[in-house]
Image (tube, rainbow, N blue to C red):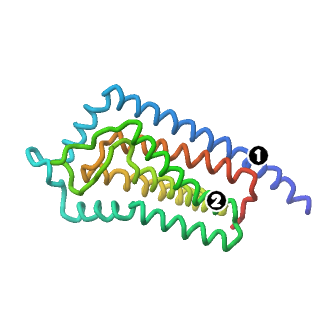
Amino acid sequence: MTAPDRPAEMSAAPRRRGRPQALLGLAVLGVIAFATSSAAVVTGAAQSFDLSLLGALRAPGLPGRLPGPPWLAEAALGLNALGAPSVIGLSSALVALGLVARRAWRPAVLALVAPVGALAIAQMLKQAFARARPPLEYRAIEAHGASFPSVQTMLATAAVLTLTILVARVTRRPAARAGVIAAAMLAAVLIGSCRVYLGVHWASDVIAAWSASAAWTLACAVAILRHGPTARA
């Protein structure tokens, strides 16, 4: 190693050590956000907000009609299909297989554990809270089971965040990394928001799903990837 390389490596080391702490800090914020939203649901404090928002997304006296131009409803249905558990599950499996082929064992484990764990957690929370979905007249599509939290939002958020973390690890350019993170956040927001727009979830269901899924995925990333090598590109 030449002398000019040492300062660069020494300056990079604190940044690498700081990343797990930053991810854990964000995970804690996710736990706090989930605890806050779930407490609001249990106490009934979220109901007024949920009803107001759902009513604002419908024309007066026409709760079954989606607002906006036809393309908006079609886009929401497309996003809803994109975030379906079968699509997310297949995508995650393909990502994991691709990583295994490259012998990236730890990233492959994360690609499977994060979404599968998010799905399991969401199902357990549904059983625990047993919250009713919005009234049938508001629903643009069929939905079954309890409402809190949104399983589809949790699963999609976990998959998107996992892919973002894996891409960010091999991206050195800050602008490119910021673009990946922004795109991932937008995808998670749109997939969750379409569930409210389509009338199959309350807004607090989706907020709780975002929070819980982010906390779980970030904690998994720290636990699984912390001691693994970071690739460079």
Regarding mark 1 in the picture, which secondary structure is present there?
A: helix
Q: Residue furthest left?
A: 61
What is the spatial separation of the Cα atoms under label 1 and label 2, in whole angstroms?
A: 26 Å
Q: Which residue is mark 2?
A: 109
Q: Secondary structure at mark 2?
A: helix
Q: Please determine whether, in this image, residue 229 is positioned above or below residue 212.
A: below
- Residue 77, given in percent of the width and then of the height, sits at 28, 62
Residue 109's quadrant in the figure? Answer: bottom right
Q: Which residue is mark 1?
A: 14
Q: Position of residue 150 (x, y in %)?
A: 38, 47
The three-letter amino acid code for the residue at tag 1 is Pro
- The residue at 37%/45% (across/down) is 206
Residue 82 marker: none
Taking 92 as reference, is 227 left or right?
Answer: right
Percent across and percent down for residue 88 are 46, 63
- Asked whether, in this view, residue 154 is left or right of residue 173, the answer is left
